[in-house]
């Protein structure tokens, strides 16, 4: 049977490890709740459910933090304005503070603002490349035309 310690040492992708750990925790939770229900220990059932909600919130916040890190890194790479973090410990429209580890992550509104900025910047960059592509296409056509004319002239001269 896999334990959390053995799962951490597996040579697999981090997301796969996280899924395995979550499945292991779910199995432990279900087992403990069924034992508490069989013993009719309703306080223990309530405590286990509260602990599980806390773990699920922690998992949610951790995935949001990881997603925020990737999105902010992409925004910085493209030099897109990133919504300002609030001062202090209070959440804002764009940022929320993780209750479990104290890190900030983007809210849905913040993700939308940053994604819109990234899309706009990437679209602008594609349009700039497309501008150069039209010139390259025109020059390639001109080179082909000149080559064709030289071939015709060469053939006419060698035919006489």
Image: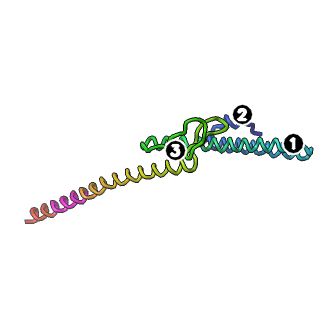
Region in magenta = 140-151
Q: Is residue 146 magenta?
A: yes
Q: Position of residue 6 (x, y in %)?
A: 71, 35
Number of numbered discs visible in the structure rendering: 3
* Tag 1 secondary structure: helix
As measured in the structure, the alpha-carbon distance from the residue carrying label 2 to the one carrying label 3 is 30 Å
Earlier-in-chain disc, 3 versus 1: 1
Residue 143, image quadrant: bottom left
Q: Position of residue 90 (x, y in %)?
A: 60, 39
Q: Going by the image, does 53 lie left or right of 65? A: right
- Say the numbered circle drawn on residue 9: none
Overall secondary structure of the magenta section: helix
Foreground of the two, 71 or 25? 71
At 53% from the left and 42% from the top, the residue drawn is: 70
Q: Give the residue number, with chain letter if any, for mark 2.
A: 5
Quadrant (top left/top right/bottom left/bottom right) for the C terminus: bottom left
Q: Give the residue number, with chain letter if any, for mark 3.
A: 71
Q: Give the residue number, with chain letter if any, for mark 1.
A: 43
Residue 56, image quadrant: top right
């Amino acid at each position: 049977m896999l334990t959390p310690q053995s799962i951490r040492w597996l040579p697999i992708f981090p997301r796969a490890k996280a899924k395995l750990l979550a499945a292991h925790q779910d199995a432990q939770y279900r087992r403990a709740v069924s034992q508490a229900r069989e013993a009719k220990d309703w306080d223990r059932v309530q405590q286990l459910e509260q602990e599980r909600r806390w773990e699920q919130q922690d998992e949610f916040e951790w995935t949001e933090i990881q997603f925020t890190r990737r999105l902010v890194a992409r925004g910085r790479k493209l030099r897109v304005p990133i919504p300002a973090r609030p001062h202090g410990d209070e959440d804002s429209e764009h940022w929320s503070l993780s209750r479990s580890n104290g890190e900030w992550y983007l809210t849905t509104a913040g993700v939308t603002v940053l994604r819109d900025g990234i899309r706009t910047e990437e679209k602008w960059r594609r349009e700039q490349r497309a501008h150069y592509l039209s010139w390259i296409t025109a020059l390639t056509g001109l080179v082909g035309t000149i080559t064709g004319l030289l071939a015709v002239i060469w053939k006419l001269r060698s035919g006489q």
